[in-house]
Image (spheres, helix red, strand yellow):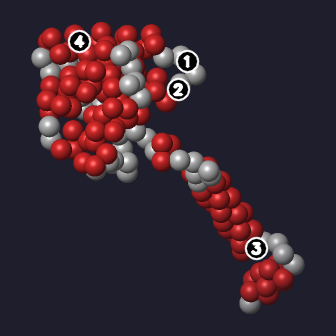
Amino acid sequence: MAELGRSSIALYQGSGPTMWRCRMNACVRLVLFTSMALCLLACTNLGGTASDVIAGSRSESYGPESAAQMEAKARSGDGHAQALVENHYREMGDAALYRQWMEEGVSRGDPAAMQRLASHLISLGGSENCRRAEVMLVRARGLVTDDDASFLGALDSTMRRLKGELPGSTPCK
């Protein structure tokens, strides 16, 4: 009985293990709430445009009515349009046009197109494709500045995939 009385007094006085857990839970909830608020703020697109969407993602595509317009933009050197056109043909299952558009980007010196084509070649396999993929990745790395960390990460990941250094991957042969 004496124990019951002591913990009641401790709870009333704002100390003891029960009150400490309550304060800790409140702190954890506050940290979680603050983290979620910061994440939402960081992910919110204030004043952005549709071009802020990652090129080639499924969330951004175009219909047949704008295909000619998008291809014209891609031919004029618009890298974003280039990626959209590639993705359009990839999603349609037209491997020949998908590859043709990646090759066009590579011929214009677009490092992102080089990375995408290298990744495609790695998936096809074969010694010639693997050698060409490696040359393209090295060339793309030389065209990119150290300021673009996310793209450098993609290049490094593709190179590691080529060499079989990623878990579950085998060297490209």
Q: State the separation of the CA atoms marked 3 and 4.
A: 65 Å
Marks 1 and 3, how far apart at CA: 51 Å
Q: Are marks 1 and 3 in contact (CB under 8 Å)?
A: no
**Residue that mark 2 sits on:** 149
- Locate residue 8: give its quadrant: bottom right
Question: In which quadrant is the C terminus drawn?
Answer: top left
Q: CA distance from mark 4 to mark 2?
A: 24 Å
| Residue 166 against residue 32 in the figure, above or below | above
Amino acid at pointer 2: Ala
Percent across and percent down for residue 108 are 35, 16
Quarter of the image for residue 109 reads top left
* Residue 164 percent coordinates (x, y): 26, 22
CA distance separating discs 3 and 2? 46 Å
**Disc 3 and disc 4 in contact, CB within 8 angstroms:** no
Q: Is 25 displayed left or right of 66 in the figure?
A: right
Which residue: 17% across, 16% down?
A: 129
Q: How would you rate the neighbour count of disc 2 (Cα within 10 Å): few for under 14, some for 14-19, many for 20 or more?
A: few
Residue, x 74% and y 90% (percent of image)? 1
Q: Which residue is mark 1?
A: 146
User: Relative to 128, does residue 77 appear above or below in the rendering?
Assistant: below
**Image quadrant assignment for residue 107:** top left
Could you tell me which secondary element the residue under label 3 belongs to? helix
Tell me the residue that label 3 is attached to: 19
- Locate residue 91, reporting x and y percent: 22, 44
User: What residue sits 31% from the left and 45% below the top?
Assistant: 66
Counting residues from the start of the chain, the first of labels 1 and 3 encountered is 3
Q: Tell which circle, 4 or 2, labels the residue nearer the N-terminal end.
A: 4
- As helix, strand or loop, the secondary structure at mark 1 comes to loop
Q: Residue at x 37, y 48 (%)?
A: 60
